[in-house]
Structures are given as C-alpha cells and as structure tokens.
Amino acid sequence: MGVDPLLRVENLVTAFETDTGRIRAVDGVSFEIEPGETVCLVGESGSGKTVTSESITRLIATPPGEITAGTIWFDGRELTELAEAELRALRGDRIAHVFQNPQETLNPVYPVGRQIAETLRIHDSGGSRPINDQVIDLLDRVGIPEPTDRVDDYPHQLSGGMKQRVVIAMALAGQPDLLIADEPTTALDVTIQAQILRLLEELQEELGMAILFVTHDLGVVAEIADRVIVLYAGKVMERAAVHELFEKPAHPYTRALLACLPGRGGETAPIGGEIPPPADPPEGCRFHPRCPHAIGACRDGDQPPLGDVESGGTDHRASCVFYQSGYETDRLETPMGERTEPTGPEGER
Amino acid sequence: MAAERDPMTFDGVDWDRWEGGRGVGSVQLLEALAGLVLLGALCFDYVLVAPGEPTIAVGGAGGPGAEAAVVWDVSSVEWLFAGVLLLGLFHIAVPLAENRRMTAYYWRQFRKNGLAVVSLGYLGLLFLVGVVGPIIWVAPNETIDYASAYAPPLGLGGGLSSPEHALGTDAQGRHIWHLIVYGIRVSFEVGLIATALAISIGTVVGAVAAYVGGYVDEILMRYVDLQQTFPVFILLLLIIYLYGASLLLIILLYGVFGWEGIARLVRSEALQRSEQAYTRAAEAAGASRRWIVRRHIIPNVSSTVITAATLSIPVFILGEATLSFLGFGDPSTFSWGRTISAGRADLDSAWWISTIPGVFLFLTVLAFNFVGDALRDATDPRSES
Amino acid sequence: MRWYIIRRLAWALVATWLAVSLTFGLLLAAPNPGADAAAAQCAAQDRDPGECRERYLERRGLDRPAHVQYLDYMSDLAAGDLGYAQSQDKAVTAAIADAWVYSAQYFVPSIFISALLGYSIGLYSALNRYSVTDYLGSFVAYFGISIPNFWFAIVLILVVGVYLRDASLFGVALEPLSLRTYYESDYPVFSVRNAKQLVLPVIVLATASVASQMRYSRAQALEYANSAFVKTARAKGASLWRVLIVHVLRVALVPLSTILIVDILAVLFAGSFVIEQIFQIPGLGRLQLTAITQRDTDLVAAITLIPVVLAIVGNLIQDLAYVVLDPRIDYGDR
C-alpha cells in the first residue's frame, strides 16, 4: 500500500452528555479508506456507525456531543484540529454526505434545483458555466428523466427514489473525493434500492471517489463493498475485505449477524440478548454477554485489540480473545447455521 | 433512552377503572357530598342571610355585645373560588394521589428544573398566606391611620418606620403588608377561577370539534379563529365601561374569552387520538360518540391541557392587574394593580407603595411561568433534551 | 390560489361586519353610561332624570327601533361618519385622526423591534443551545412575559427620571443623557428630542412582545434545528447564518406566520393603554380612557373597532402569507 489513505480515522472517541451521564457512542474506532474504494461500516442500530460517519466532518451537535479523543486524517490534514471555517470549506466540496431519509433531507420549501445549486454557491466551485446548466447536468447524471422540467419541482412532488437521486446530485455537486452515505437506501423500496446502489457504483467509477457506506444491511454490503468494518457498541469487532468477511467470518458477532440472514443454508438464528446500555457497557469484550463462545478472559480488561486472522494475506482482523496469541481458534468452529445458546453475562463455559 | 422511560404516563392510565360497572366509586361519592355541602352553604348565604349581613359572624371573647372575632361576608367570587378549589382537589389532586407511579415519574422530571421547584414552593406559600392571611391580618381599610401615613419600610430609616408596619404604609396609612396579603387572594381568584372556566369550555369545544368533525368542526374553528384574533383587552374595557367593574365580571370575561388556545390544543390532540386503535375499538364495540369523547379522548389530553392552563394563569393575573391599574378593577377589592396605581402620585417620595406590590406581582407571574414551562417539559415526551 | 384569496378576503369582510354588528348589538343591549350620566346630572339639578335621559337618547336617535338604528349606523360607517365625540368636542374621525399619530410613533418602532430582535435572538438561541446568548435570551424571555408593563414603566421612570438625573458616573454628570420621562407633544415628530422621549415607552412596550416572539421563534426553530435538512445544509458547508436564515427561518416562518402579526399587535394594543397613561402620550389609548371616563359612547365604540379591524386585516395577511410560504399546501384543502 504505497499510496496514503484518503481518510484515516485513529481511535476516535465521540461522547454525549446526557441526563444519565456521559455516553461514548464511539469508543475507540479506527479504520482507513483508500482513494476510490468503497468501505462499509456495518452494525446494528446503536452501534455507533452513524455517529462515526458524522464525526468525520464534525456534524455532531456540539452540545451535547463532542469528539473527545482520536485523530481523523483527511488528505494530510487533521480534521479534529481544524477550525469550523476550514471544516466548512471541506464539507460539500471534498467530503459530501448522503443521509437516510430523502423526504426529510430535502428542505420542503425550496425547489430541488435551488438546493443542488446551493452546494455550488457555497463553494463557488461553479467555474464559468451558469449554475442552472450545471444543476441540470447533475440531475441528468443521477438519472432523473427530463431534468430541465424537474429543476423547479418541489421535493414533495417527487417520488422517493427521485428524491434520493436529487440528494445524491446535491452531494456530487462539489465533486467530492469522499462520499459518506448513511443508510441511503434503507427508506426506499427494494427495487429502487437496487437502482440507487447501481447509480452509486457508476458514479464512483466515473468520478473516482471513495465511498464510506454506513448500513445494517449485509445484503447491500455484499453488493457494493470493497472492505467492511463491523461495529458493535461503539467498537470495531472485525475488519476484512468483503469476500473474506462473508466466506470466513472471524468474529462471533459477525458470524451471528450472518446467521441472521435468510438464504444461507440452515436456519436463521437471532442473536439472543440485547445491545448493552450505552452509558454502562460491559467489562471486557462488549459482545461477551451475548457470545456463545465467551470464556473467562472475555469478561475482564478492555476490548481485545484487533488480532490478525489467518485468511490469506489481506488485512483481516478481529477483536476477539481467540485471535490473540496463546489461544486457539478451533474452539470457535461452530458450523454455520447450528444454534448455540448464548450464555448470558456470566459466560460460564 | 427508551429503557428509562416509565410507561405509566398520564396517557397510559387505565381510565376504564373509572367506568367499571354502573357503580359509583367512593371518591366520587365524596366529591358529590362535598359539592352538596358547598351548594347548601351557598343557598344559605343567598336565601337565608340578608344582603349586607355577613355570612359568618363567630362570636369573640368577652360577653354579649363584644365584636365578633371572625366576620366574613362570603362574596360570589369567593363561593366560586371554593368551588374551583374543590374541583381541583377531586380532579387533579385525587387522580395524582391514586396513580403514584405516574405522579412520581412526573415529579422526577419536574424536579430537574430547579427554578420551577422553587417557584412551586413560593406559590404554595403565597397561596397559604392568601387563604389564611385574612384571618390573621385585618383588612387594609381597618389599618387606615393618617398619623402613620407614608411610613417607609423597615431598614430604610425615617422616623415613621416601625416593626408594626414592616413594609411601610401608603397614603392613608394602610399597612403595605396587609395590602399584599389581600391582593394575593384577588390574584389567585382571578387566575384559578378564570382558568378553570377556560379549561372547561376549551376542552369541551375542542374535543367535540375533533370528534364530531364536519360542519360542526368548521363552524367551531372559525369561531375560535375569530376569538383568537379579537383583542380581548379592548373588549374587556368596553364591557366594563358598559356594565361597571366587578371582580366576578372580570373573572367571567377572562374565562369566557380565554379558552381558544386550549380548544385548539385539545382539538389537535384529540384528532391524533381519534385515529388511534383504542378509539376505533371502542367504536366497533358500539360506544356512542359522547361516551368516546368523555371516556377516551378527554382524559388523554389532560396533560397538554394542564400545561396550557398553568400558562394561562399568569396571563389572567397580569390582565386583571393591568385593568385595576387603569382604574377598571373592582373598587371593593385590593388588587395589587390598584395599590400600584395609587402609589404613582408619590413615586419620588414614597416609592415603596408602588414598588413592593409590583415585586410580588412580578415574582408571582414569573413563578407561574416557570412552573408552567417545567410542566410542559415534564409531560411532553418530545421536549428538548 | 385565486379562489383561496377571494375566499379569505370574503371571510375578512364577514368578520369585520360581524365585529361591527356585535359591537353595535352590545352597545344597544347594554345600559348606556352616557344616558346614566345625563340622568344623574339632571337629578342633581333637581330636574326630572327620566326626562333628561329620554332627551339624551332622543338627541342621538337612540330611541328609535333597533333595526332602524342599525341600518343608520352601518350606512354612516360606510360613509365614514363615526359619530360625534362629545368629550373632545369634535367629530370622532377628527379626534382619532389627531391622536393616532402619537400612538404610531411608539407603536411602529415597537413592532419592528419586537420582530427583529425577537426572531434573531430566538433563532440564534435555538441553534446555539447552552450558549451565553441562549441563557441571556431565556432570561429576557421570562422577564419580558412576566413583568407587569405598568410596573416596569414606573420603575424605569423612577430610575431614569429620579435617580439617574442626579447621579454621576465617575464624576461625569449623567443628566444630559437622561431621557425625558413625560411626553411633550410639541416636538416635531422626527427630531432627536422626540426620539429621546420615545425611548422609554418603546422599551417598555416592546419588552413583552420581544419576549413572546423570542419564545415562539425559539420553540419553532428548535423543532427544526435537529432536522435532517439542517444537517444536510451543514454537510454542504453552509455557514451558521445561512443555516439560520435560509433554512431554519424560512421553514419556521410557515408555522410562525400564523401568529406573527396578530400576536405582536395583541400584545402591543393591550400595552398601549398603560404606556400612554403613564408616559402621558396623547394617543389613541389615552383618548379611549378619557372617552370612557367621560362616558363618550360614540368615541368608545369607534376606538374599540380600530384594533379589531387591524387584527382582522393582520389575520388575513397571515393567512395569505401562510399559503405563499408553504409550497406543499394544496389550495383546494384549506
């Protein structure tokens, strides 16, 4: 890997002050994104994936939230140190966002053309062509039919899929190097989902931009990811290239997630238990209360550091005691689909 | 966090307990009894006691011929006040006491707002002083003594100040403290009675409009629009001009012209709820509209109504004070507004006459606003946090 | 859209007619204090009070049947004749014309200040929770809606007029800075001296309305402050001001427009009586109070109608604004 990664997040900690105390929604997350690649951030709701994605450009509402530790390197600059004005210059121009629900993402009182143009106006990156032409171009690029007519439409006049295309157009307007998409297809119909995903792939190829795709849907991950980061309770559980993750999932949590998917042969098995309360996470490995393989060592100390998984030379690591030196992984060999009962907080084995 | 919220909110209370069978609960029996007693006393006052004669004149120490210790001619406003307090007791205090968990939950939320708790304490104290005060301290007119007129409050020097009238005296020698105490009662009467009236009218109108819908809804809402646009104060001046100033009139006017906000709120809440499953279920079971409105919709909009009501109280109190200040108040009462107005002429020499009642008025209104806002935060799950 | 405007205009006219008729009805049904006063006067002079009362009513045509009076009243109104103001010894319209200028002088600046200050602080507070401005704003808001304006005025007069006049700060006398507390109606309208004497009335009047506008706008803005489209705007790199004005304010204007004008007007109207009374400004408020004490029924009725009509017009403007501001509304519905 000779090229410097486009984005490098190191030990990011983002915390929120609430009535019940300080909650660390993101508790030491690290990953990188190379230029032009698609990295998926996967996890259940409450895993910290959205907060991670929004911390990058510091979109978190600053009271009550705050980035309390860690560094974020983007193109040679440390984002957590930047002043708000400098960060604003990056937002929309080099790093763009697409959010989940297009109905709410678009401002209901302005026509869509104007909202796309806003990105151009803010960054004055129009160049010499009239802004309206550029907007129409963008609409065309994201696959909206008859863009010249659609420019003056209000969001409520468009269908869900069209709205999301508009949102993507807004994000692309600044020709970003990194697109952060937070569950962009979750609120859409399944058929539209496929179209949007395809659109994103095309655009990525065309523009050479990297995508950080946040989702809980492993099916989507399988389709578009190059690499995957699995989050649970604010920490990284596993990271791998997409094929390896699906073929040789290392962490018990990842395995359990995959076991939840229908159509993989065998029964689907829900993960017993609940995600831990954010204000009071479990000691040791955060997943241990629900892990069918938990042993004594899982209950103490910190989350185990990411250990290498032997799977063929690529960067595949899991945060599990069994991947630390001194342990053997054959205890984890539970065939896919076979139910194992979680042992609860005591983890007696 | 979802795990923290207590599910026993006002809205989750099983109101069907109240319906039960056709039988009547013991609390309702008590309420009916208390109501009857009040009504009886009212009749006694109006029918048997001659006008101008005090309702109660309890004999004092000393033999026959001695002055009565407690002389009280209960006015119509005071009867109303007693009625409203009774209603408050049975429809607010009793349900709160019966649903311990819900009350504890609300209290926990409310307690987070320190200012509101202090305000509540202040208001409670004030209320006590207002109710009990007239027994301890005589009416201001009894303290008229031109020799001690314009006495400054204690601590400000001046030859006339004395512990006997610690807050000073006005132009006729009335003790400022007595004026304050009697003014408390006026403010509370206006605030509570007018609000009770506004709640009653507003809730009924709003719930009916929401549930019946159609033309009825349209007409009612048009009227609400009209009333909301109408500058009520102007109308009040006009009516008082025509009919003369009396506390009862002022209270009734505020009650009758102050309900549109509540009606709107109730209507929108009721509209949301009439779409919900339990209402449909009741319909399917054959319940009449009136039944549904009374048993399902009204109890479930209570928390919004209480909040809106608590925020109406300061508006009414300020309004009455302003009217009194301008000279449109009831001349037989000692509203704070009146006292402040009376002190205006001597502002540079005897500033305490206007200032001290003003401080009390300000603090009281402020307290109600704090409490009302805290109530809203405590009962509205959507509130900012 | 056109149909909607026509309907609203028609409604405004109906409402005005209703208001006028109701006022008329009220006056007809209620005891006429003017007549009472005339009768009392006669009784004091040992004349027959009943006769005087009748003569009073007869002179004003108040003894005619109701519907005749009504028609006359309405036609007079349409012609612009509002009757004769006994207490001012001139036509009602003339009395109002003389007085309204003085009212406008403090009223109009108060409206602008309330809207501008109230909204900007409210919006800013919503987006900068827990900042100094937010706390200050909250303080001002509670203060403004709780303080009795007449008491506030008195205290200000006391402080400015009595104490500040004699005081000096670091040896520099504050006297030249002090503001006039009682209004002098001779000053030309657009003079510095006039402005100086309007400062206190405007402060007192605007406080309550700034406070309520601040609360409303803050509450509405809070609803939108955490919404997705605001987050999107920030993600595009928008500055705080752009987010505030282009996004939050514009969207919040939709619900805010339903109270914007009328609410300010209501607060200001109620306050104007007190302001004019205390600061002795010869405006409409004071005219009304004088008319009431002098039992000048014609004048009282006419001045009552002014805020009512203004409120109806304000409501109309609000309704139209609401429809213009929200592109989602289908004009067929409302």
Image (cartoon, coloured by chain):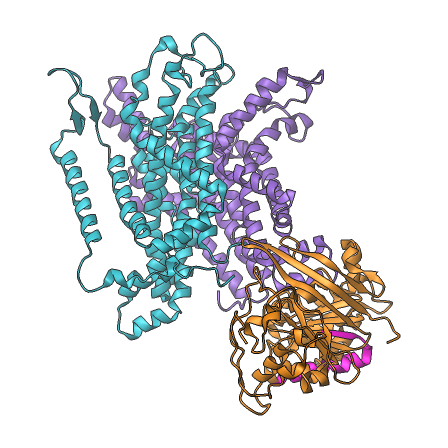
Q: Which chain is purple?
A: C
Residue B375: x and y in percent read 44, 48
Residue nearest the observer in this picture, C172 or A55 = A55
Could you tell whether C184 is left or right of C83 in the image? right
Is residue C309 within the magenta segment?
no
Residue placed at 79% from the left, 72% from the top? A133
User: Disc count in the image?
Assistant: 0
Give the residues drawn in magenta, as a range.
Answer: A191-212
Is residue A205 within the magenta segment?
yes
Residue B114's place in the image compared with A187, above or below, is above
Q: Quadrant of the N terminus of chain C?
A: bottom right
Residue nearest the observer in this picture, C28 or A19 = A19
Specify the principal SS of the magenta part.
helix
The answer to whether residue C280 shows anywhere in this view is: no
Q: Colour of chain B?
A: cyan
Residue C20: x and y in percent read 40, 46
Residue placed at 30% from the left, 71% from the top? B282
On the image, which quarter does residue A303 sit in?
bottom right
Residue placed at 73% from the left, 62% from the top? A57
Could you tell whether A203 is left or right of A237 in the image? right
Residue C240: x and y in percent read 71, 53
Residue C209: x and y in percent read 54, 41
On the image, which quarter does residue B83 sit in?
top left
The answer to whether residue C206 shows anywhere in this view is: yes
Residue nearest the observer in this picture, B276 or B90 = B90
Residue placed at 46% from the left, 28% from the top? B358
Residue nearest the observer in this picture, A299 or C127 = A299
Q: Colour of chain A?
A: orange
